Amino acid sequence: MKKGTRFLSPFGITQILMAAAVIAALCMAYEPWRWGKVKDAVRASSPGVVSIDAARLQEWIPAKDRPQPVLLDVRSQAEYDAGHLPGARRLSADKTPADIGFDDKEKTRFVLYCSVGFDSASVASSLTQRGYKEVQILEGGIFLWANEGRAIEGGSGKVNPGNSKYTYLLKAAHRAP
C-alpha cells in the first residue's frame, strides 16, 4: 500500500453502510416473524381453542354494554405475584373456575393467559372439554401484552418470565428484576 492512501474508498464505505442497513432491517423484521411462529405453534398445539388479541381484549374490558370477561392467569403464583393483567385472578392448572368461585359454565366468559399461550391453550382445551362454553386465550400471552406497553398490575408492574423457554420474546424493559 502506498503511503498516504486511504484504507477504504468511498465505494467501500458505501458497501459497508449498505450491508449495515440490510442487517438492521433484517433484525427489525425478525421479531414479528418470531411471534408469528410462536402463535402458529400455539394454534397447532390446541386446535379449536379460540384466541383474542390484546387490542380487542383491551377494548372489551371497559365496555359497559356487554358482560365483562373473567381474566385467568394460569402461570405460577410467583409469576402472578410479580405482575399480571389488571383484574386477573390466578387459576392453577389443576383447578377449574368453579374452584375459585365462578360456577356458571354456560354464560361466564373466560380469557386465560400464560407467558406466550401454550399453557393457557392447554387449560382452555381442558375447560372446554369440561363443559365451559365461553373460553378464549390471550394471543401472545402476557409477554406480548407487556411488549405492546399495556398495563401490568401487582408486584413490580413488570412480568416475571419464569422458566419459559420463550423469555427471549419478552423485551428486557418489561422483565421483573
Image (cartoon, helix red, strand yellow):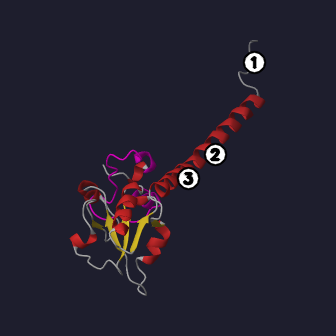
Q: CA distance from mark 2 to mark 3?
A: 12 Å
111 to the left or right of 99:
right
Picture disc at residue 173: none
Q: Examine the structure image and report whether residue 159 is included in the region drawn in magenta.
A: yes
- Closer-to-camera residue (91/86): 91
Vertical position of residue 168 compared to residue 95: above or below = above
Question: Most extreme residue toward the top, as rendered?
Answer: 2
Q: Give the mark, 1 or 3, whose residue is nearer the N terminus.
A: 1
Q: CA distance from mark 2 to mark 1?
A: 33 Å
Q: Nearer the viewer, mark 1 or mark 3?
A: 3
Is residue 152 in view from this perspective?
Answer: no
What's the magenta region?
142-170
Badge 2 marks a residue whose secondary structure is helix
Magenta residues: mostly which secondary structure? Answer: loop
Residue that carries the numbered disc 1 in the rendered image: 5
Q: Give the mark, 2 or 1, whose residue is nearer the N terminus.
A: 1
Question: Most extreme residue toward the bottom, as rendered?
Answer: 65
Badge 3 marks a residue whose secondary structure is helix
Picture disc at residue 32: 3
Q: Position of residue 140 (x, y in %)?
A: 45, 58
Residue that carries the numbered disc 2 in the rendered image: 25
Going by the numbered disc 2, the residue's amino acid type is Ala
Going by the numbered disc 1, the residue's amino acid type is Thr
Q: CA distance from mark 1 to mark 3?
A: 45 Å
Q: Give the mark, 2 or 3, whose residue is nearer the N terminus.
A: 2
Q: Position of residue 174 (x, y in %)?
A: 39, 54
Q: Residue at x 34, y 55 (%)?
A: 159
Q: Position of residue 51 (x, y in %)?
A: 46, 66
Q: Nearer the viewer, mark 2 or mark 1?
A: 2
